[in-house]
Image (cartoon, rainbow, N blue to C red):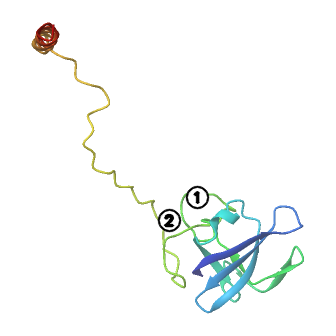
């Protein structure tokens, strides 16, 4: 098993099947899958695949015609990789280099770092009695200054 990069996803005539072209450590191969999470928007992402010759349990992966197209491997789910968690039948996506072996356990998503912010909290601090008095005094003085400025012009 190794990490592969999805190069192309093409729906097949057969219901739910997709032809996926992947980049392996040795070149490109086609894999037919019915994994619901492998869609066109996943091009460029990396997942784990068992290519021809790899043993999964008691079965050795061999080239097989599926949905009228030849498949040269299987996109692995967490059950095939013996990971806890994850859904059966959904391809496993990882952030590793192409050709790397799959991790021994399910990778945890990286926590996004929150950007530093200078914004105030969600709720503004209530003004104190002194703050209200100071604001009222400043407003009165501004009105007086404005009134004096208009009287001088007359």
Q: Is residue 8 above or below residue 15?
A: below
Residue 100 % position (x, y): 51, 83
Which quadrant would residue 70 be assigned to in this image?
bottom right
**Residue 31 image offset from top left, x and y in percent:** 74, 78
In the figure, 114 relative to 140: above or below? below
Q: Residue at x 71, y 85 (%)?
A: 29
Which residue is the site of mark 1? 86
Q: Quadrant of the N terminus?
A: bottom right
On-image quarter of the C terminus? top left
Q: Quadrant of residue 122?
A: top left
Vertical arrangement, residue 142 with respect to residue 87, above or below: above
Please tell me which residue is depicted at 66% across the width and 80% down the height of the picture.
22
Find disc 2 in the rendering and name its residue: 106
Nearest the viewer among 86 and 22 is 22
Judging from the image, what secondary structure is the residue with disc 2 in? loop
Label 1 element class = loop
Q: CA distance from mark 1 to mark 2?
A: 8 Å
């Amino acid at each position: 098993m190794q990490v592969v990069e999805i190069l192309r996803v093409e729906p097949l005539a057969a219901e739910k099947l997709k032809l996926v072209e992947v980049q392996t450590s040795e070149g490109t191969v086609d894999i037919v899958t019915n994994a619901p999470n492998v869609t066109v928007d996943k091009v460029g992402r990396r997942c784990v695949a068992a290519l021809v010759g790899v043993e999964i349990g008691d079965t050795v992966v061999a080239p097989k015609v599926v949905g009228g197209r030849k498949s040269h491997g299987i996109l692995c789910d967490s059950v095939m990789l013996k990971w806890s968690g994850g859904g059966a039948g959904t391809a496993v996506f990882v952030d590793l280099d192409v050709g790397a072996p799959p991790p021994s356990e399910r990778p945890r998503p990286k926590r996004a770092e929150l950007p530093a912010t200078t914004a105030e909290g969600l709720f503004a601090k209530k003004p104190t009695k002194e703050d209200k008095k100071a604001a009222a005094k400043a407003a009165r003085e501004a009105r007086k200054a404005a009134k004096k400025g208009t009287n001088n012009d007359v």
